[in-house]
Amino acid sequence: MRLVDVDTPALLLDLDTFERNLDRLDQSLGGFKVRVRPHAKSHKCPEIALRQMAHGAVGICCQKVSEAEAMLEGGVMNVMISNEVVGAAKIARLAALGKRARVSVCVDDAQNVADLDAAARAVGATLDVLIEVNVGANRCGVNPGQPVVELANRIAVSKNLRFAGLHAYQGAAQHARTPAERRNAISKAAQQVRMTLEMLHEYGIKPEIVTGAGTGTYLHEAGSGIYNEIQPGSYIFMDADYNRNLGEDGKPLRYFEQSLFVWTTVMSHATAGRAVVDAGLKALSVDSGMPLVADLPGVEFLKASDEHGVLKLPQRSPLRVGDKIRLIPGHCDPTVNLYDWIVGLRGNKVECLWPITARGAFY
Amino acid sequence: MRLVDVDTPALLLDLDTFERNLDRLDQSLGGFKVRVRPHAKSHKCPEIALRQMAHGAVGICCQKVSEAEAMLEGGVMNVMISNEVVGAAKIARLAALGKRARVSVCVDDAQNVADLDAAARAVGATLDVLIEVNVGANRCGVNPGQPVVELANRIAVSKNLRFAGLHAYQGAAQHARTPAERRNAISKAAQQVRMTLEMLHEYGIKPEIVTGAGTGTYLHEAGSGIYNEIQPGSYIFMDADYNRNLGEDGKPLRYFEQSLFVWTTVMSHATAGRAVVDAGLKALSVDSGMPLVADLPGVEFLKASDEHGVLKLPQRSPLRVGDKIRLIPGHCDPTVNLYDWIVGLRGNKVECLWPITARGAFY
């Protein structure tokens, strides 16, 4: 099937670009001694996770138990849930996964540690547990230093838990625009982790894993001498928001190329200067701004309603009703979550359909 | 099952409130002679559409062919697609639906009229066609007056199309905050439709249907003497954005009550003043602002990331890890589209699970 015959809206993946992005991550890490554990929340697709594993990833990250379940079903047998899992039903499912595959989870609460230990004991499993440390994202995680030591000691006395390390993700730094902002944020995060590690060492605790990092900052974590595992996710796809990050020369960085697009049809062009496409809020997440129009300089995506995207056209635009165009999503992760499959393209031909089996897997 | 045992995130519908909202729409329309054709893009759920039909609705509106297909599968046999349908594949599916049920569609383009006619002829169907008129929303639709006459004449000579009327939805007015803004916008829209109707009458064309209106303005269309069909959608659910619309007394209107909630768990509370819930961008659409926290005065939903919602807590908040709370979505339609089923509650007990069969139906 040719691209032009693919009905819209559809989620397109340019396979050549996707594969170049996989290679580029490897190339950029040539001088560093870090393991790669890409984040599957970006793609929710075992086909992609398996390709990342084939590229040397030690496993993948998920945010939810149901995401991890989908990945295990798809043959990915090493999953870190880079998030807290709370509630008896979810914890029981997590413990069951721990019997089937290598699964780890994060904690930032003493009662949650006790709940995880009890659930693992009930099924005869041992769960790897990482302590989430707040290194500036101000979301989950205990503060660096003494709170980490206290929680590590609780894990140490929990018979069915194994203390696996620290999860110290600085999410707020990923989209900081200038290299200096990103470098400084990760430098501070690494200092806080270093201080915490020194305190843990005093108690004889040596975390095996120190993990964090996203597509925006992973080279800083990799070069810190502190982190030994990184979790980039968006690098395979990129999006309009990540493409606004700047390099040292003040120009957009674009080390990774845009491989993900929303394919859409012009469904109305009744007025000069305005066209409407068939992709709106239910085909595109606008949380990080409107999508960009690929391939058509001067055409702007103005606003989205449920099922409509309004385009502002330049004078003498040749765009006509029925034309299909590519949009660059503002934010890749929640956009992917709106689709049931990815249309993989080799040039202008459809090569594969990859099911997004963890679509909607937020449980 | 009790509410407290429902795992999170989940989409909750308070059935008593939902049923009151159905009744209130009827009550508010007591003095008007308009047909009700609720918009199914809000709920995407045949179970709800059938209840609206049982309340006297003449049919429902959809935005997409796939949405209409899901409604027909669910037993709703009278569907107006309040939108343009473009592209050979979609038009062929639409024509096929026209053989099975009463289906109508909107147009704003002459070539699209020809394409619809040819597809209907190919399967021996007759399609009802409405002309979409731009009455201020500045999205799809031809301008009022002469452009409508020209398109109506094209439809009149299309053997497999029947000119059914005008679709004149003023979407931009629905969330205008003051009653005066909403009234003025619909007054202007009705004037433009009246002028267009007069021009059509000169050509001997008498549209059967004049349709439009949403939850924010439907009483104005109903009282206009011009519109004879209305399409409110959100009134069954409501959302944080609609709840900001004001009444004549300058206070939030709230004629319809909030029946839709996102059920979420506190998954982290490692720092005083901040808690994190397990519903983020993949469980809530934030296009119209952040959700509100129900039941807990003083607690604010600050920001959402993919799978996290960060809450700002007042001093001495009793909230603990594992507590479940209800959120009021910022915008109901794209939030519903993130879920596969609705959990219907009678008080604090689960009474039903309604599948959202048109979830992701944007084709």
Image (cartoon, coloured by chain):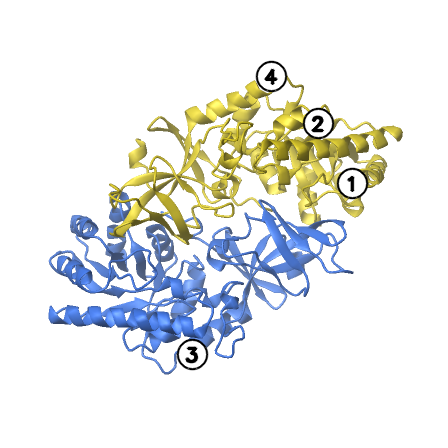
Chain colours: A yellow, B blue
Q: Which mark is residue B201?
A: none
Q: Which mark is residue A30?
A: 4
- Disc 1 + disc 2, Cβ < 8 Å: no
Which residue corresponds to the image point at 67% horizontal and 46% vertical from the top-left? A90
What crowding class fits label 2: few (fewer than 14 Cα within 10 Å), some (14-19), or many (20 or more)? Answer: many
Q: Residue beneath label 2, please?
A: A227
Q: Is label 3 in a helix, a strand or a loop? A: helix
Say which of marks 1 and 2 sits in front: 2
Q: Is A162 on the left-hand or right-hand side of A246?
A: right
Most foreground residue, A251 or B92: A251
Residue A232 location, quadrant: top right
Q: CA distance from mark 4 to mark 1?
A: 39 Å
Q: Chain of mark 3?
A: B
Q: Earlier in the sequence, mark 4 or mark 1?
A: 4
- Farthest bottom residue in view: B31
- Farthest top residue in view: A31
Residue A353 x %, y %: 41, 33
Q: Chain of mark 2?
A: A
Q: Residue beneath label 3, please?
A: B28
Q: Is label 2 in a helix, a strand or a loop? A: loop
- Disc 4 + disc 1, Cβ < 8 Å: no
Most foreground residue, B212 or B358: B212
Residue A153 x %, y %: 85, 37
Residue A185 x %, y %: 67, 35
Q: Which mark is residue A117?
A: 1
Q: Chain of mark 4?
A: A
Q: CA distance from mark 2 to mark 3?
A: 63 Å
- Please check whether the numbered discs 4 and 2 fall on a single chain: yes
Residue B184 x %, y %: 36, 73
Say which of marks 3 and 1 sits in front: 3
What crowding class fits label 4: few (fewer than 14 Cα within 10 Å), some (14-19), or many (20 or more)? Answer: few
